[in-house]
Amino acid sequence: MSDDIIPVSPEWAKRAYVDEAKYKEMYEASVKDPVKFWGEHGKRIDWIKPYSPEAVRDVDYTGNVRIRWFHDGALNVSANCIDRHLAKRADQVAIIWEGDDPSKSKNITYRELHAEVSRMANVLKELGAKKGDRITIYLPMIPEAAYAMLACARIGAIHSVVFGGFSPDSLANRILDCDSEIVVTADEGLRGGKPVPLKANCDEALKKCPKVKKVLVVQHTAGKVGWDGARDVWWHDAKAKVAADCKPEPMGAEDPLFILYTSGSTGKPKGVLHTSGGYLVFASMTHQYVFDYHDGDIYWCTADVGWVTGHSYILYGPLANGATTLMFEGVPNYPNSSRFWDVIDKHQVNIFYTAPTAIRALMREGEAPVKKASRKSLRLLGSVGEPINPEAWLWYYRVVGDSRCPIVDTWWQTETGGILITPLPGATKLKPGSATQPFFGVTPVMVDADGKELEGACTGNLCLINSWPGQMRTVYGDHQRFIDTYFRTYPGKYFTGDGARRDEDGYYWITGRVDDVINVSGHRIGTAEVESALVAHAKVAEAAVVGFPHDIKGQGIYAYVTLNAGEPYSEALRKELVAWVRKEIGPIASPDIVQWAPGLPKTRSGKIMRRILRKIAENDFSNLGDTSTLADPGVVDDLVKNRSH
Ligand code: WTA
């Protein structure tokens, strides 16, 4: 924990949209009368049919759970991100694309974006896509990913973007869950100079997805790919045959915009569903205020469009605001660990938003790679995805930002659609390691394990009362799971799954997940997913997976594995299991440590005691708690004895 407090500089208080007094005033107004507040701010986007004052907010967190915002309004999200800027900024750059290869970059103006998105929309229509259809997008970080997402929004199709690092199996499960009949992919992606075989993965996945009729393929590396002439269509061929204009489809505010799969504590990943109106209002408003985005700023979020951060803060928020947004294909350490800072100089980036894991990895390389670049254009830094430890925060602040750029540590989730707890750079004193204060309209509450609300300074579980327009509306195809996951633990409240501390100034310090979700380098992985991948291996009888503290990744994956009776334990098999999980789920889910466990600690009713497994993984044997209720207390001693590193 850090005692540093960094005050708002007078220049920031003056230039920002809100200073401290204005924040207080707006925040109070937003919680006192949310209908009035959001009724006014909903107008920041263009509506084809305006919403009525009665339809601004319709929310019930009890019973069947209903969340609707602006529900009688109609709009088109792609028109809001493109068409409405054409009169004023057709020639302004909308997207700066920076390739994995540092010699490759390109600028796409709003006029070009309009033409490309329209073409992609027309091609999708020709392939049979209609309003309400689900389209799966499995692309690298190339402009076509933005075109595809916006093209779906333009014709009213619901996109489901699947991160390019996911395996064929993970892709297949996501295609099947939402019943996509069209997939958009590329020949290959490129990361750190190495090709990622997207089309080949897709071909493999589609063996399990007979309903997929068409695959639109972007040629990116010109690598060799397999081809199904009846199913596969090259984007460059198809686009030459369609018009560069496509009328945006009017959509109801509550019509779905996208599904994004995310891991939870149980079962398979769930399809988080976001709708059109409220999501766009919230993504654009948070982008403007949190990053204090002004016309002419160059803004860079380093996330991948396969995650929610890429959806809300590379694409929808910035483009709705008419911003210039940078999209980066590569990785922080290729061709060397100055890459981020070189790109900042190259494109004169003013606002830079990245993840703690990247900061920690770069911090290890020392200051020299940072100091090689000038970084004079930088004005504001942001962090997202996991708690940032004060040490990394201070390095980011002092070394990267030369102690002149505020850091916005933004807490939010796939489910929340946009940033909920965050500093505003002109308003909020910073404490390294704290996400600080709620955004407008957001009311965090802290509860203890029994659901009792805690007052003042406290430690507990983080819940939210009141809705905000960017909130998810349901789990695609499984509303009951939505209710059970988020609204049952503490009735009447949305439970985030995060633990937190609130200090005497009302600042929030997020401590991390309190459920069975592991946050590895800012990527959410359910312990249940890794366990089911492990037990799918022919030699594995049982597996239990927990998180453990990891210097760079924040958390690592620790797997306890019991083999089938008589199966010999070997180093080769250990490696095979790690590779197996990589293949089953994707590289982000590879276990860091596999410990052989001839037995797992279980209660007499057969429940695995994860609390004990977490302690052993953390190398903390002093506090294993009461193990006398275990069916076989001896297994704990064995595990402790064999704790491997
Ligand atoms: C964690 C990413 C601390 C948290 C936008 C949350 C954070 C999960 C922060 C959501 C932060 C995200 N400080 N923890 N600034 N931001 N988290 O759905 O545990 O990929 O519940 O959304 O990441 O991850 P998700």
Image (spheres, grey):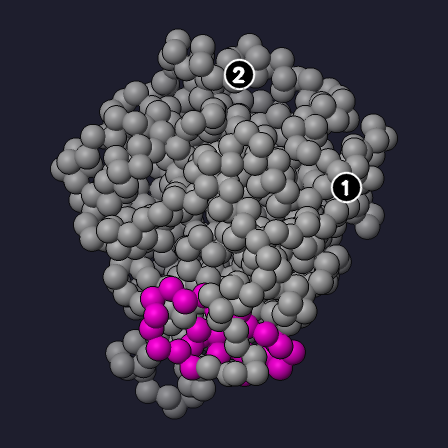
The local secondary structure at tag 2 comes to: loop
Considering the numbered disc 1 on the image, is that residue within a helix, a strand or a loop?
strand
Q: Quadrant of residue 241?
A: bottom right
| Mark 2 CB within 8 Å of ligand 1 | no
Which amino acid type is marked by label 2? Val
Query: Crowding at label 1, few (<14), some or many (≥20) Cα neighbours within 10 Å?
Result: many
- Which residue: 64% across, 42% down? 79
The residue indicated by pointer 1 is: 74
Along the viewing direction, whichever of 194 and 501 lies nearer the viewer: 194
Relative to 485, residue 464 above or below? above
Q: Residue furthest right?
A: 54
Q: Position of residue 186 (x, y in %)?
A: 44, 67
Which quadrant holds the C terminus? bottom left
Q: Which residues are magenta?
A: 199-226
- Choose between 31 and 509: the one closer to the eye: 31
Q: Residue at x 31, y 37 (%)?
A: 347
Q: Name the residue beneath numbered marker 2.
A: 18
The mark lying in front, picked from 2 and 1, is 1
